[in-house]
Image (cartoon, rainbow, N blue to C red):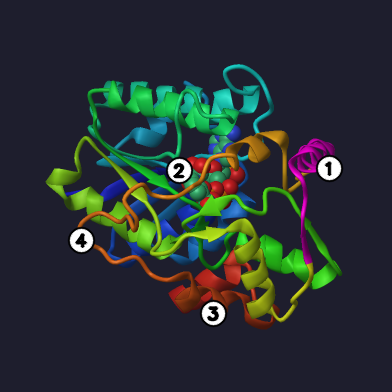
Amino acid sequence: MSVRDVLLIGGSGFVGSHLVHRLAARGLNVRVPTRHRDRAKHLLVFPTVTVVEADVHSAATLPGLMDGQDAVINLVGILQGGIGSPYGAGFARAHVELPQKIIAAMQRAGIRRLLHMSALQAAMDAPSGYLRSKAAAETAVCASGLDFTMFRPSVIFGDGDAFLTMFAKLLAIAPVIPLACPDARFQPVWADDVTAAMDEALSRQEAIDQTYDLCGPKQYTLRELVAYAGEISGHRRPIIGLPSGIAYIQALAMEFVPGGPMSRDNYYSMQLPSVCATGCGLPFGRQATALEAVAPGYLRDGRWRSGNDRYRQVARR
Ligand SMILES: NC(=O)c1ccc[n+]([C@@H]2O[C@H](COP(=O)([O-])OP(=O)(O)OC[C@H]3O[C@@H](n4cnc5c(N)ncnc54)[C@H](OP(=O)(O)O)[C@@H]3O)[C@@H](O)[C@H]2O)c1
């Protein structure tokens, strides 16, 4: 079935904004619910995109959002969801209960096609609530009977990312970087490669009931990634790897900083290498783009821009 109308939940964020751009560019109608319309106003530059302020958790709201849609994409994800067993309350709500509600609403509305964003290394016995809650959602999606495609990326880089850009901003102001988990391994994948795979999955029959791990072409340690962000943003700084005990205490302390960049749960996630088992990973024969080919374009000399600027430029408005 060809897809024309898409409900993109979590479409106002970093990956969502890239995906909206891609889907709108080929004329799809995209409905983006957000809790705060202001946060998604950069998406209004696209004529086929509708931004709706809505509570997607509400049983009264979700059916209306599904009305007239051919497919649903769920990108909702949080990094700070509390600590608890099997996961913190925030993770339970955003990563487990919400996907269950989305599945139920799709079943009632008779919408079959679902793209769901998980994360590499999600597993019920993973060390972090983030990864365990992502695994619980995977189980629900697989059991849904819907035509699903699941994506499990390593860390995602690209214009507007919260990873390399956060380090570049930090390096611009800090004389030295005390780094938790410096040897944690990642295989960063470009946002445009991720969204291209998602877009292609919408029209590929063989993508139905499949789960794809998404990785870039090369593995790095966290220390290497932070050093690289410093190199290209013009702020090389000494990086001091913290021993694990101190890293844990730093993560705990950061939980008291509103919007803090680190938590114990993040620390636990980084105990697992976020890399693809079989090397480079993209579906449909796609070649992954190198970090070095893209990151200088948005990080060099501190030239990171707001999402608004980027999408105005893309839409020429
Ligand atoms: N970025 C990465 O490196 C990476 C790596 C692996 C997996 N992922 C997964 O990819 C997905 C997208 O990540 P991202 O980097 O684009 O995240 P993001 O920029 O933080 O965007 C998160 C989106 O989720 C929505 N959201 C957050 N909490 C919500 C809640 N409690 N209820 C309803 N909506 C909520 C936000 O909508 P509002 O407009 O309402 O705020 C926003 O649209 C997530 O599932 C994430 O776990 C990301």
Task: Check whether the beta carbons of the residues at disc 4 and disc 2 lie within 8 A of each other.
Answer: no
For disc 1, the marked residue is 257
Q: Nearer the viewer, residue 29 or 97?
A: 97
Query: SS class of the residue under badge 1?
Result: loop
Determine whether, in the image, residue 59 is placed left or right of residue 114.
right
For the residue with label 2, is its CB less than 8 Å from the closest atom of ligand 1? yes
For disc 4, the marked residue is 285
The overriding secondary structure of the stretch rendered in magenta is helix
Task: Check whether the beta carbons of the residues at disc 4 and disc 1 lie within 8 A of each other.
Answer: no
Q: Nearer the viewer, residue 26 or 242?
A: 242
Task: Check whether the beta carbons of the residues at disc 3 and disc 1 lie within 8 A of each other.
Answer: no
Query: SS class of the residue under badge 3?
Result: helix
For disc 2, the marked residue is 75
Does residue 163 lie above or below 142 as drawn? below
For disc 3, the marked residue is 297
Quarter holding the N terminus is top left
Residue at 57 percent of width and 29 percent of height: 127
Residue at 14 percent of width and 45 percent of height: 206
Residue 311 percent across, percent down from the top left: 51, 69
Q: Amino acid at mark 3?
A: Gly
Write the start and end of the magenta stretch as one range.
239-256
Quote the CA–CA distance across marks 2 and 3: 25 Å
The picture quadrant where one finds residue 190 is: bottom left
